[in-house]
Every structure is written in structure tokens, then in C-alpha cells.
Amino acid sequence: MDAPQVPSISVSPAKSAIILIDRPGLITIAELSAEELRIAGLRINPANNGRSRQVFNKGFRIMNIDGANLREIKGMPDDPKLGSPVWSPDGKKFAFTNTKKSVIELWTCNIETATASKIADGLNLVFENSFSWIPDNEGIIYSIIDPDRGNKPSRSLVPEGPVIQENTGKQGQARTYQDLLKDPVDELLFEYYGKSQLMLWDGNKSTEVGKTGCHQ
């Protein structure tokens, strides 16, 4: 059960390089027992604004498409919990996330030099797809936690009144998703975790683009 898993692979768009993706065997008890927020059909880790109970990759290695020149990547994060690699359109770089206890980071790796570097942190991964390369092969659009979101909404332990359900004799709409929004506090929590600030990294620095609502 604890034996190393067979690596999965990701082939570059130019079909010239391969990423070997080292995977863990099993999710840990600590990860399974971590706090989880279930709201609007999502499973959220409130500690870092990511998805809860995810299985992360342990490391990446690069080799040529013919299997030659296998090499380690320099500058990788310590104790990595990596998302799937996303290639730039020209296949010369790839980007990936690294999830820590209280924050999610965005990294890139240069294939030629086999060197990784962090470019941002505070990513919002509630909706999973939080970054994308732009066609110039240098820039990345990504979303971070809304810096102006304030304090987390709290639910009062004292109910305002009884829970009332009314049957008017008409056919009701059946639920099609789990954990739908049930009250104004659920709506505030959904807004709190879902709202993002859109950013653009141009290869050197990041700048704000605009804010995205939690409906996306």
C-alpha cells in the first residue's frame, strides 16, 4: 500500500518534452480530518480557499520525448503539494500550484533550465481553474482571494425564529445539487469564499485586472 506509485506523464504541446509526475499513495488521516465547508455544491477548505481533501502530486521531473536527459527541477518548494502542470502554448514553460496549510501558491518552471520559481500566492481555488496562460507564452491570468473581503461571516447561535415549511398543494422543484444555499448567511459565505481579484503576470510582475464575482 505504501509502495511508490507509477508516475503519470504530461507531454509538451511541441511533443519535445515530458513531465514525469510523482504521485502519493494515499491521502493522510490529517488531510481527511481537516475542516471542510459544504456550500453551493462545493467542498471548500476554509483554511486556504482551495478544494478540500484533494490528492496532490509530490514532485515533477523532466525528460526529452525520446526518454533521454532525465533531470530534476531546481528551486521546487519544500514539502510540495502540487497541482497538475499546465503547459504554456509553446511548450517552453509550465505552471502549477503548490498548496500550503493557509495559502495556495502559483509557480512556473522553465523547461530549458529546469528551474522553478514562485510568482504569486493567495490563489483562490474554490472553483478549481484559477489560472491560464495567455497566447504570448509569457503572461498568466490568475485569480487571488479578494483582498477587500473583510472578516468571515458568522452564524448566530440564537435562531431568529422557527423554521417554517409550507405545502400549498403544488408540485415543488426537486433539488438537483447538494448543499444548496439555504439562508442569507450561506449567501454571505459563498460570496466571501468565491469572490476573487483577477491578476495578470506579464513574466516579471503582477498587476490587477478586475474582480470576478462568485457566480463564475
Image (cartoon, grey):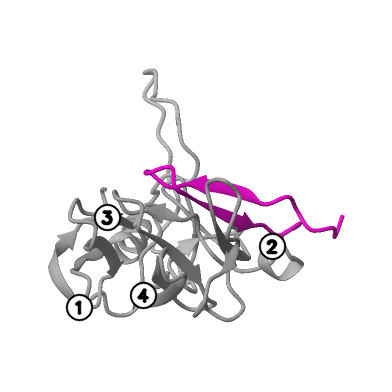
Q: Earlier in the sequence, mark 4 or mark 2?
A: 2
Q: Secondary structure at mark 1?
A: loop
Give the residue at x 49% y 80%: 75
Question: What's the mark number on residue 19?
Answer: none
Question: What's the mark number on residue 32?
Answer: 2
Q: Earlier in the sequence, mark 3 or mark 2?
A: 2
Of residues 118 and 51, which is closer to you in this image? 118
C-beta proximity under 8 Å, tags 3 and 4: no
Residue carrying label 4: 122
Say few, some or many: other residues with alpha carbon within 10 Å of mark 3 (under 14 / 14 to 19 / 20 or more). some
Kind of residue at disc 1: Lys
Q: Secondary structure at mark 2?
A: helix
Say few, some or many: other residues with alpha carbon within 10 Å of mark 4 (under 14 / 14 to 19 / 20 or more). some
Residue carrying label 1: 205
Q: Secondary structure at mark 3?
A: strand
Q: Is residue 183 left or right of residue 147?
A: right
Kind of residue at disc 2: Leu
C-beta proximity under 8 Å, tags 3 and 2: no
- Between the residue at mark 3 and the residue at mark 4, the CA separation in whole angstroms equals 18 Å
Residue 56: which quarter of the image? bottom right
- Between the residue at mark 1 and the residue at mark 2, the CA separation in whole angstroms equals 36 Å
- Between the residue at mark 1 and the residue at mark 3, the CA separation in whole angstroms equals 15 Å
Of discs 3 and 4, which sits in the foreground? 3
Q: Secondary structure at mark 4?
A: loop
Q: Is residue 65 above or below residue 184?
A: above
